[in-house]
Amino acid sequence: MSDYYGNQPQDVRPGIDARRLWAGGVATAVVAALLAVVGLLIARGIFEVEVLAPKGEGVWGNASTTTYALVAAAVALLATGLMHLLSVATPAPSQFFGWIMVLVTLIAVVLPLTLTVTPSAKIATAAINLVIGLVIAAVVNSMAASARTLHRRRTQQNTAPPPTRQQWTGQEPPTRYYDR
């Protein structure tokens, strides 16, 4: 079926501007790393709570501030990769991304609560993980929304103009044009 000018309908498909997405992903990684540093400074410096340093034991042992920040940055980059994959392969990338990030953040919050350390260390670590997870999810999701594009491709073009009165031989042109 063609339109009035004989052009075929456009093939419109969603896409993603990968450069913008990954530039935003790197910026999100920096934000996540800095957020981890701020969280650790608040917990350790203000409240004097040992976060992720339960006397050399536990899942991370005595992870340093640098390690925690690098892990947060890596998670942000993984989230960006996940969003890129979902954007090119699934019909509702934001929905799937949201659910996956909620579940991953929930794991990151519950995991420290299962350790055999002081309750204050459990709660501080869980709170920092919650904030980092929510920020990564929100920033990557909104950043990906601004990186989405529509790719238009004409399947066939006919550049001939519509028929005029002079082209009709002895009769008025039809009032409607029908596809054949």
Image: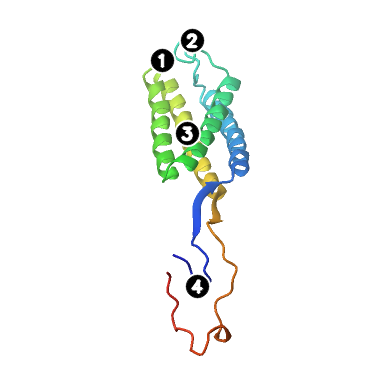
Check residue 101 in the rendering and tell me which mark sits there, or answer none.
none
Q: CA distance from mark 1 to mark 3?
A: 22 Å
Looking at the rendered structure, the kind of residue marked 3 is: Gly
Above or below, 68 relative to 172: above
Q: Between marks 1 and 4, how big is the CA–CA gap?
A: 73 Å
Q: Residues within 10 Å of mark 1 (few under 14, many from 20)?
A: some
Q: Nearer the viewer, mark 1 or mark 4?
A: 4
The residue wearing badge 1 is 117
**In the rendered image, which residue does mark 4 sit on?**
4
Q: Which residue is mark 2?
A: 55
Callout 2: few (<14), some (14-19), or many (20+) C-alpha neighbours within 10 Å? few
User: Looking at the rendering, which quadrant does residue 126 occupy?
Assistant: top left
Q: Front-most of 53 and 169?
A: 169
CB atoms of marks 3 and 4 within 8 Å: no
Q: State the residue in front, 12 or 82.
A: 12
Disc 1 residue type? Val
**Label 2 to label 4: alpha-carbon separation:** 76 Å
Q: Badges 3 and 2: C-beta atoms under 8 Å apart?
A: no
Q: Which dot, 2 or 4, sits closer to the camera?
A: 4
Dot 4 alpha-carbon crowd within 10 angstroms: few under 14, some 14 to 19, many 20 or more = few
Give whichever of discs 3 and 2 has the lower sequence position.
2
User: Mark 2 belongs to which amino acid?
Assistant: Lys
Q: Is disc 4 placed on a helix, strand or loop?
A: loop
